[in-house]
Image: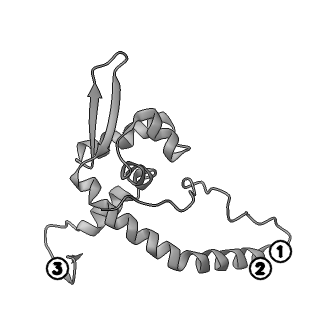
Amino acid sequence: MVVYTGSVMDHRDDGFCPVHASISLLQEKWVLHLVRRLLHGPHGFNELGRAVGGVNATTLSQRLERLERLGVVVKTVESTMPPRTRYELGAPGRDLQAVIEAIDAWGRRHMPACRAAEEAAAANAAPDAPSRSPAAPSADGPESPAEELPAR
């Protein structure tokens, strides 16, 4: 099996590929949106759901539970009445800031041309069909405006 090790590809017999494993986690719907929001600091459950927009409570709970189990997110329950739950990033979650910044830089550099190519292809494929507005959110999650990440 060919495995990416950071700077070169090599063969390993154990079948583990850190790139595949990382992409598998990060591609789950809402995960990067949650991490991106938590880079700004701790959030309560409902506050976090509103901040990322569009995620239902069941999905939010499942994603946060998995991220907590993996150490990406740390959950704190405050003993108040009613109890208040806060979520913040653990060290592995904070390390994702560089990943999100890299995605942001790539997107700013390449996505305008990608979007223009998709719009041109859609216009050529069905000239009578109404085209989707570039500002319309996709079914894959919210399209949020440019947002500054906190300084590292």
Q: Residue furthest top?
A: 81
Residue on which disc 2 sits: 124
Q: Is tag 3's residue or tag 2's residue first in the polypeptide sequence?
A: 3
Residue on which disc 1 sits: 127
Residue at position x 27%, y 20% from top? Answer: 79
Between 128 and 147, the one lying in front of the other is 147
37 shown above or below 9: above
Horizontal placement of 132 versus 70: left or right? Answer: right
Between 125 and 26, the one lying in front of the other is 26
Residue 114 placement (x, y as % from top left): 59, 77
- Is the residue marked by circle 2 packed among few (<14), some (14-19), or many (20+) residues within 10 Å? few
Residue 33 placement (x, y as % from top left): 45, 53
Q: State which quadrant residue 103 falls in.
A: bottom left
Identity of the amino acid at label 3? Answer: His
Task: Determine the secondary structure under disc 3.
Answer: strand
Identity of the amino acid at label 2? Answer: Asn
Residue at position x 41%, y 60% from top? Answer: 149
- Is the residue marked by circle 1 packed among few (<14), some (14-19), or many (20+) residues within 10 Å? few
Residue 27 placement (x, y as % from top left): 41, 59
Distance Cα–Cα, label 3 vs label 2: 44 Å
In the drawing, what numbered circle is on residue 18? none
Residue at position x 28%, y 62% from top? Answer: 21
Task: Determine the secondary structure under disc 2.
Answer: helix
Mark 3 vs 2: CB contact within 8 A:
no
Distance Cα–Cα, label 1 vs label 2: 6 Å
Identity of the amino acid at label 1? Answer: Pro
Q: Quadrant of the C terminus?
A: bottom left
Distance Cα–Cα, label 1 vs label 3: 49 Å
Q: Residue furthest bottom?
A: 8
Q: Residue furthest left?
A: 13
Kindly report which numbered mark, 1 or 3, lies closer to the viewer in this rendering: 1
Residue on which disc 3 sits: 11
